[in-house]
Image: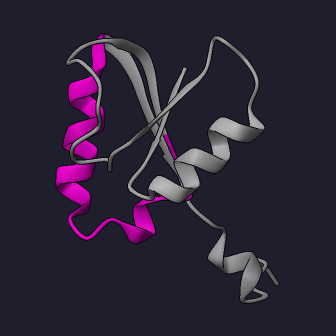
């Protein structure tokens, strides 16, 4: 598993907190993820899409990192819940 973030400070904190040899952290954004093309079975963006200046380029970077037939997924905050909207009567 590789985690990436454009903030060197956040990456350093993650390295200090997560003590698992199967996990690494690299400085880089979604558009220029520091990984090889077609290297991962799954690529996930958690709570990030709202902050990427060029969302299309960020998603393209995620797709580039996924193997053919791999999974690319993203999730963001549930703004409806934050605003008190329940979606029904």
Left or right: residue 53 versus residue 6 is left
Identify the residue shown where x is 46% and y is 37%: 73
Magenta highlight on residue 67:
yes
Left or right: residue 75 versus residue 13 is left
Identify the residue shown where x is 25% and y is 70%: 53
- Whether residue 89 is situated above or below residue 52 in the rendered picture: below
Q: Position of residue 48 (x, y in %)?
A: 48, 59
Q: Along the line of sight, which residue is nearer the eye, 27 or 83? A: 27
Q: How many marks?
A: 0
- Whether residue 36 is situated above or below residue 63 in the rendered picture: above
Q: Position of residue 10 (x, y in %)?
A: 57, 55
Magenta highlight on residue 42:
no
Q: Position of residue 27 (x, y in %)?
A: 39, 44
Q: Position of residue 47 (x, y in %)?
A: 56, 58
Q: Quadrant of residue 35?
A: top left
Whether residue 40 is visible here, answered yes or no, is yes
- Whether residue 45 is situated above or below residue 55 in the rendered picture: above
Colour scheme shown: one colour
Q: Along the line of sight, which residue is nearer the eye, 77 or 85? A: 77
Q: Which residues are magenta?
A: 45-68
Identify the residue shown where x is 38% and y is 14%: 40
């Amino acid at each position: 598993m590789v985690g990436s973030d454009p903030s060197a400070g956040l990456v350093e904190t993650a390295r200090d907190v997560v003590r698992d040899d199967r996990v690494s952290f690299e400085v880089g954004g979604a558009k220029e993820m520091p990984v090889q093309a077609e290297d991962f079975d799954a690529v996930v963006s958690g709570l990030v899409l709202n902050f990427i200046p060029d969302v299309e380029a960020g998603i393209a970077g995620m797709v580039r990192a996924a193997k053919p037939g791999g999974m690319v997924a993203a999730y963001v905050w549930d703004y409806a819940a934050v605003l008190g909207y329940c979606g029904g009567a």
